[in-house]
Amino acid sequence: MQNIKAYMKEVGQAARAASRFMAQADTNAKNRALENIATAILLNSARLIAENAKDVDAARQNGLDAASVDRLTLTDKTIKVMAEGLRQIAALPDPIGEISDMKYRPSGIQVGKMRVPLGVIGIIYESRPNVTADAAGLCLKSGNACILRGGSEAIHSNQAIAACVHQGLREAGLPETAVQVVNTTDRAAVGELITMKEYVDVIVPRGGKELIERVSSEARIPVIKHLHGVCHVYIDDEADIDKAIRIADNAKTHRYGVCNAMETLLVNANVAAQVLPRLCKIYLDKGVELRGDDTARKLVAQMKVATEEDWHTEYLAAILSIRVVADLDEALSHISTYGSQHTDSIVTENYSKAMRFLREVDSASVMVNASTRFADGFEYGLGAEIGISTDKIHARGPVGLEGLTSQKYIVLGSGQIRI
Amino acid sequence: MQNIKAYMKEVGQAARAASRFMAQADTNAKNRALENIATAILLNSARLIAENAKDVDAARQNGLDAASVDRLTLTDKTIKVMAEGLRQIAALPDPIGEISDMKYRPSGIQVGKMRVPLGVIGIIYESRPNVTADAAGLCLKSGNACILRGGSEAIHSNQAIAACVHQGLREAGLPETAVQVVNTTDRAAVGELITMKEYVDVIVPRGGKELIERVSSEARIPVIKHLHGVCHVYIDDEADIDKAIRIADNAKTHRYGVCNAMETLLVNANVAAQVLPRLCKIYLDKGVELRGDDTARKLVAQMKVATEEDWHTEYLAAILSIRVVADLDEALSHISTYGSQHTDSIVTENYSKAMRFLREVDSASVMVNASTRFADGFEYGLGAEIGISTDKIHARGPVGLEGLTSQKYIVLGSGQIRI
């Protein structure tokens, strides 16, 4: 424990020093590093796969479930995707140094803002080793240093990727300590990372709810986090029914295990008989389990009973809860009571109801006539995504490069003093 | 203790409910409430002064120092200023609902952001009762509900101001619970306020370092805070000497007890002999105690020795530490080592050095050829200020209405689904 403390302090100090260097690094050097890392990853793919095999073997021996083993496994294809992701980050505009809103004030000074890195970012994640490259790339481009703490089950894979990252940084003349991958599987390292206020400016936990809840309850540093995704689609009685069915189908069945998938469908009572039999046939054909309130169940025989628990649940699976509501007010009240402030969508052709929904739903993403599946950094044009925040402070919704930056005030004067 | 817990929970629930209402309140109703509160404060000034007298008497009996009693005391003039402040907030543009950056994406959806309130803001402050009106006004205008916890020494004054606030809200058709002033002096109330995650979205502590440190170390809710203000002016060897002397004089002596006052002056060795004797005469004439390094002391006989401790110190008094540095690099390194990331200014006519200073100094406000005293919400044109943040997350520097808001993503579609 004492050794972990000393080791993490060393890591923290090195990160803080590197962050000062990275904040000043020019765009060209950062992009060159990203390209170098991508090349190193491709050239070393055989070694990455060999190191990854150690993790995969151990995971199988430890009885890790198939889905987790799958997330852990690196293939030629996932390695190519990793390298491609880094090149995409290189192609994004550099957010650092951007000056905005410069305005003259009556005193004669000119005041505005300059975008700057946050400093040192601690990222705690689980089995996917590709997060090592993604997170390193995003932090690097945004001028931050980072400390990455991957899952213990991926330690060999992560260290092998780290070697490529360090090679890329070195070749671009940037400090290797700009990206440090914690080399111990001791959980005490996480405890240190999330409390080293002097060395770490923000923590981004990525993984299951348990990890995120633990990190955010114990952290003494601001956390950018994503908790639940209990997303809703509300089909209004003035909806275009074809659009409604297309959107509700897509929001649920495009992918089941993702945070922006719809978990509860709300249907206006006036169109429930028109919508539900047709829509539920699609769901049932795709093997989606349906759980509804009494009104919905009268329209679709195969629907099970939804309990109070269901309205709160993020299934992340082929299960959907369905509720028939009297009007927009009831839909808004349901979302406010049971939603997780992640992503909610209304389907309607009525202007006033669309505007009310946009204004009144207090979620990170609020949509009109679009699938909740669009709540994503790439779909929003951020170019990349470190995660989706369900917090209100700092970054809300998909977090791209800009979420890893801050703005300082700059003042240009010509000798002004306060009178 | 159990009673305080129950009381604060009740306050929290009422605030959460009010915050939903306030988020939808129209600009007109919010401005009317602000005007009403201003009027109520003016009409009730005799009662405010009578209630305040109880606090002032008690403070004197308890042996509170003169400066604190002064801060606590309400006069006709401070009451007028309070009312005027509320009217100024009414005159500011409403930040809520502002839509920006709407752009079409290749999928056909249009994505942008809408500005929304944070929700419930907890404000913890010390003796000045005018904060009750200021903070209530800022939270109200930004569509937030707030829970105010003033110093126990100002309890009668704060409750009297709260009565005016409630009257103003009521007359404008807004819920009185949008602004709640905690009516107990039990310190356990603070402990509850800063940990009630379900009911409070952000905490703003305003007061001395001790209060702020305690709040931020114990809070389980994000904190917008201001810690130290160890501000620097660096006089470069390519400075216009007249500007340099004017700025360095103003930055130190315009007001001593404020966070944006200069605490350490850095002077380039090439101009030290030109600058220091002339500038230090001004300081000494104004009664400023000077503490310098060896080089500086050779130039000004009356200067005491500055210790390592001095470079770290926010005097908030008529004391100044002075260091002669070899060049810009040494100045930057001093600021990075000893500064508090609040406000720092360079005086130079050299373009490249000005640009380097702007980019490399990692402070909330970075200035060229201007007094550090300009780091202020009013001077920056924010119209009002809830405080100055020395954090990097969310809000940096002077925090106005916008710092009490967040942005959610909005998506306008016409039936789009993810493919």
Image (cartoon, coloured by chain):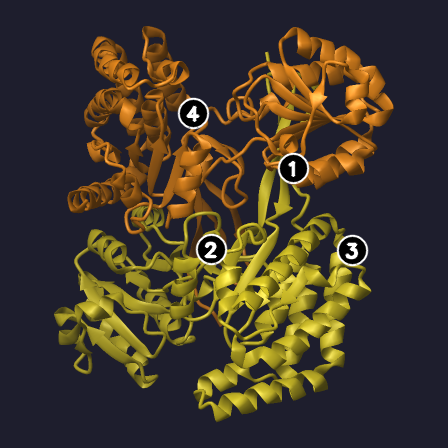
Chain colours: A yellow, B orange
Helix, strand or loop at disc 3? Answer: helix
At label 1, the amino acid type is: Tyr
Q: Position of residue A54 (x, y in %)?
A: 60, 88
**Residue that mark 4 sits on:** B92
Give how far apart the Cα atoms at labels 3 and 1 are: 31 Å
Asked if labels 1 and 4 share a chain, the reply is yes
Q: Does residue B301 appear to the left or right of A192 in the view shown? A: right
In the image, what residue occupies the spot 47% across and 90% down?
A: A62
Subunit that carries the residue with mark 4: B
Could you confirm whether marks 2 and 4 are on the same chain?
no
Residue B338, numbered circle: 1
Q: Between A14 and A310, which is closer to the camera in this rendering?
A: A14
Residue A295 visible in rendering: yes
SS at mark 4?
Answer: loop
State the separation of the CA atoms marked 2 and 3: 30 Å
- SS label for mark 1: helix
Q: Give the image quarter of residue A66.
A: bottom left
The chain letter for the residue carrying disc 2 is: A
Give yes or no for contact between labels 3 and 1 (Cβ–Cβ under 8 Å): no
Residue hosting label 2? A223
Q: Residues within 10 Å of mark 1 (few under 14, many from 20)?
A: some
Between A133 and A166, the residue placed more toward the observer is A166
Q: For the point 22% across and 24% down, which residue is it?
A: B159
The amino acid marked with disc number 3 is Asn
Amino acid residing under circle 4: Leu
Mark 4, residues whose alpha carbon is within 10 Å: few (<14), some, or many (≥20)?
A: some
Proximity of marks 2 and 3: CB atoms separated by less than 8 Å = no
**At 23% across and 27% down in the image, what residue appears?**
B169
Sequence-first disc among 1 and 4: 4
Q: Which residue is label 3 attached to?
A: A28
